Image (tube, grey):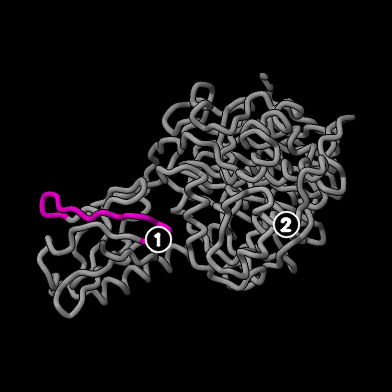
């Protein structure tokens, strides 16, 4: 479906230039190549337009038909699908997971006995994030969920919010069992098709055949192209790709209680459940800076729920290689805003979302770009200080206690599996999952990851017994025992 840029001024007190100025100012402030912005109000498209560039060095702006990954904004599609299955009487929110996903296990017997479908999509199982179980992993989604079942539970069950995408993947597998079809096919038939989301897909690699934005990252102050993250197997936690035009009916559905026009997609009651707070989040530490206009913050099912200047606001962000997405809802005011941009590490989406909310509601203006840029600057300063402290403590004159060949071998962790350490051209090389990274000596029996943009600078520590035999290594916050 081809969409043209849509701008409707009849529903808004502000002149057009307020939106245009907010968007172009944000692009400049954050040095983001391109963005598509969607604004819906009172079931009408108010704004739908792309700005900037799809590729940083080509003067070609993204349009309403340009494809962007949603990343974790996909999670709300999974919970909406779950609501449909509850409507059909095929599941209940508080069903035990194993009623629908045989073989599902968690490591703690208490949690394992009590975990429900609701727990999977509210980040309250107590399982820590462990994103490396899915990111660049060569194994299947089913194997990923199986491995997560061997991880230790970090927090008491249902007592803490621990963002956990693998549990959302488990929910997708359960939906497939309940619905009798793979998750991506259910999403296509039950949501994309009835909503008219003709350009949307759960398979990122298929989007590359059509009009799509290029992802970017900043390296030493310069923009570089990042290849699309395109796993072969769809994932209920974050593999949906959309266009700005396709997000219009999605926003309308969210703002109309599960209904699009005369078509009831989800019952009002079960749809409302996905928007209902389930886990309270403490506003302390970094959250105080990220949510300065908020008194109460919680997580629903695929949505953060907060108050914002006296209004109820729902939102979710998504980040994946080269891209960031933000979706914001004000259900009572019937306002929805979607922002799709092609720079990986940026808080522009949150800053621009707040700015546009203030414009649409004609609230007192605040320089959200400066606010969030200051946060980013403080985060960078803290990272630099941690690096300087680590470098200060480094004993560069302390050589490895053993010859490099003593560290070679296969190391095993019960959830993460096998990691192999080899020697190539006087460098140790660590191979695990989708990673193959050279190591440089740091000091003693610790080594530093090189080359890989995600792991670069992280430390690996080998541990030997009193006889000089290496028994284990610690990397990516896990201990691998030598086989």
| In this picture, residue 293 sits left or right of residue 234 | right
Whether residue 396 is visible, yes or no, is yes
What is the spatial separation of the Cα atoms under label 2 and label 1, in whole angstroms? 32 Å
- Percent of width and height locating residue 407: 18, 63
Which callout, 2 or 1, points to the residue nearer the camera?
1
Q: Relative to 287, say whether 249 is above or below.
A: above
Residue located farthest toward the right when viewing the structure as drawn = 262
Q: Which of the pair 460/3 is nearer the observer?
A: 460
Which residue range is magenta in the image?
Answer: 413-427
Q: Which residue is mark 2?
A: 300
The structure residue drawn at horizontal position 74% and vertical position 55%, both measured from the top left corner, is 95
Whether residue 245 is visible, yes or no, is no
Q: Which of the pair 82/62 is nearer the observer?
A: 82
Residue 70 lies in the magenta stretch: no
Quadrant in the rendering for residue 483: bottom left
Which quadrant does the N terminus fall into? top right
| In this picture, residue 280 sits left or right of residue 480 | right
Q: Relative to 166, say whether 298 is above or below.
A: below
Label 1 SS = loop
The structure residue drawn at horizontal position 30% and vertical position 72%, both measured from the top left corner, is 390
């Amino acid at each position: 479906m081809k969409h043209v840029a849509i701008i409707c001024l009849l529903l808004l007190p502000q002149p057009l230039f307020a939106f245009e100025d907010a968007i172009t100012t944000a692009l400049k402030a954050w040095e983001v190549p391109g963005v598509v912005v969607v604004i819906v109000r009172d079931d009408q498209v108010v704004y739908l337009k792309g700005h900037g560039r799809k590729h940083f060095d080509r003067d070609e702006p993204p349009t309403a038909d340009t494809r962007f990954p949603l990343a974790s904004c996909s999670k709300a599609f999974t919970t909406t699908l779950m609501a449909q299955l509850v409507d059909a009487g095929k599941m209940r929110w508080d069903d035990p997971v194993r009623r629908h996903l045989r073989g599902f296990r968690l490591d703690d017997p208490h949690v394992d006995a009590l975990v429900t479908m609701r727990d999977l999509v509210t980040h309250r199982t107590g399982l820590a994030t462990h994103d490396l179980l899915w990111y660049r992993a060569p194994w299947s989604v089913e194997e990923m969920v199986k491995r997560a079942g061997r991880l230790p539970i970090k927090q008491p069950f249902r007592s803490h919010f621990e963002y956990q995408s693998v549990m959302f993947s488990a929910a997708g597998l359960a939906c497939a069992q309940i619905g009798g079809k793979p998750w991506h096919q259910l999403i296509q038939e039950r949501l994309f098709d009835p909503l008219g989301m003709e350009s949307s897909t759960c398979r990122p690699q298929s989007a590359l055949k059509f009009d799509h934005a290029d992802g970017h990252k900043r390296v030493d102050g310069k923009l570089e192209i990042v290849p699309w993250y395109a796993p072969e197997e769809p994932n209920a936690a974050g593999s949906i790709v959309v266009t700005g035009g396709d997000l219009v009916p999605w926003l309308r559905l969210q703002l109309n209680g599960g209904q699009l026009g005369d078509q009831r997609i989800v019952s009002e009651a079960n749809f409302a459940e996905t928007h209902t707070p389930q886990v309270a989040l403490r506003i302390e530490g970094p959250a105080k800076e990220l949510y300065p206009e908020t008194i109460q913050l919680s997580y629903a099912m695929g949505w953060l729920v907060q108050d914002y200047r006296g209004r109820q606001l729902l939102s979710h962000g998504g980040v994946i290689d080269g891209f960031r997405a933000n979706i914001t809802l004000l259900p009572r005011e019937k306002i929805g805003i979607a922002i799709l941009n092609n720079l990986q590490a940026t808080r522009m989406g949150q800053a621009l979302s707040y700015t546009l909310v203030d414009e649409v509601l004609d609230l007192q203006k605040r320089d959200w770009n400066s606010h969030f840029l200051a946060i980013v600057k403080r985060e960078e300063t803290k990272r630099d200080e941690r690096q300087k402290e680590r470098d200060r403590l480094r004993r560069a004159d302390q050589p490895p206690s053993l010859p490099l060949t003593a560290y070679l071998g296969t190391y095993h962790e019960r959830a993460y599996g096998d990691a192999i350490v080899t020697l190539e051209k006087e460098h140790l090389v660590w191979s695990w999952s989708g990673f193959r990274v050279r190591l440089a000596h740091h000091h003693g029996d610790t080594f530093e990851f090189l080359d890989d943009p995600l792991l670069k600078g992280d430390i690996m520590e080998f541990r030997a017994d009193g006889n000089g035999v290496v028994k284990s290594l610690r990397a990516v916050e896990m201990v691998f025992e030598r086989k």
